[in-house]
Amino acid sequence: MKNIVVLTGAGISAESGLKTFRDANGLWEGHDVMEVATPEGFQKNPELVLEFYNQRRKQLLTAEPNTAHKALADLEAHYNVHIITQNVDDLHERAGSSKVLHLHGELLKARSINSTNKIFDCKKDILLGDTCAKGYQLRPHIVWFGEAVPLLADAISITEKADYLIIIGTSMQVYPAASLIGFVNNNTPIYFIDPKPAITSSQRKNLSVIAENAVNGVPTLVASLIDK
């Protein structure tokens, strides 16, 4: 069974009603990302940061997977599919995808500020004073700007084995996630689905650009791959 690796960004989740990470004005839900998505921001104002993610978590729990998420799950009947997502939501899993790697963490998990390895399921608010068994404050299990990306090596290993690479709803500007395209074989077909694609077929060998939003472009591509 051939390997399909899918790299997804905020564009696929936006169509389920979740705001993209950063709007055109550089803000995320009205906040400077440096205030709510950096270790320094958390140290300066932990209550603001915790409440910010509490609101994002509540929003996620009301969202549903869209047709793009579901189409990717359908691919598993025909290919070995690995999804590497920059998104912190669980919409891929809820749609039925079984192999999902979250490069930037998961909103429905929390961890101790003292350890990146002690991770807890979390569907409720995290408040200042909520601690792990050893007394350390809990924080969202999110990879903030300036922090290491622990699963990057795993993502690279998966990408290197791709027979097809599908990129959906990402600006290809956030590193190291954007660098993954460089780890596929030169002959690997790449499909880039985004209404405003950041790269063109003239820039990359074997690249097919589908200038559509995810809910339109993904089901069409999936249908063609299943027919191969």
Image: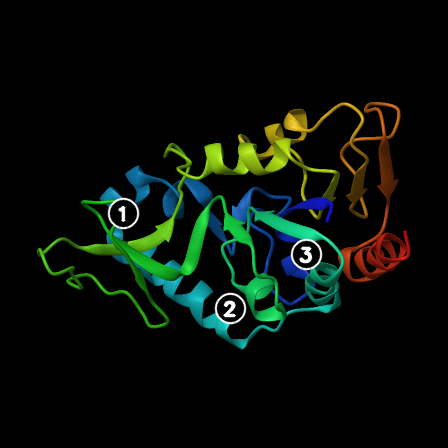
Please name the amino acid that badge 3 sits on.
Ile
Q: Which of the two discs, 2 and 1, labels the residue nearer the N terminus?
A: 2
Residue 120 picture location, percent across and down: 29, 61
Q: Which residue is mark 1?
A: 117
Q: Depth check: 29 or 228 in front?
A: 228
Question: Which one is in front in this view, the residue at disc 2 or the one at disc 1?
Answer: 1
- Residue at screen point 61% across, 62% down: 97
Q: Where is mark 2, residue-wise?
A: 60
Q: CA distance from mark 3 to mark 2?
A: 14 Å
Viewer-nearest of labels 3 and 1? Answer: 1
Q: Is residue 47 left or right of residue 95?
A: left
- N-terminal of the pair, mark 3 or mark 1, is 3
Other-residue count near label 1 (Cα within 10 Å), few / some / many at <14 / 14–19 / ≥20: few
Whether residue 100 sits left or right of residue 107 in the image: it is right
Secondary element at tag 1: loop
**Can the viewer see residue 34?**
yes
Q: CA distance from mark 2 to mark 1?
A: 24 Å
Please state the horizontal and vertical placement of residue 168, each as a whole percent of the image. Answer: 72, 47
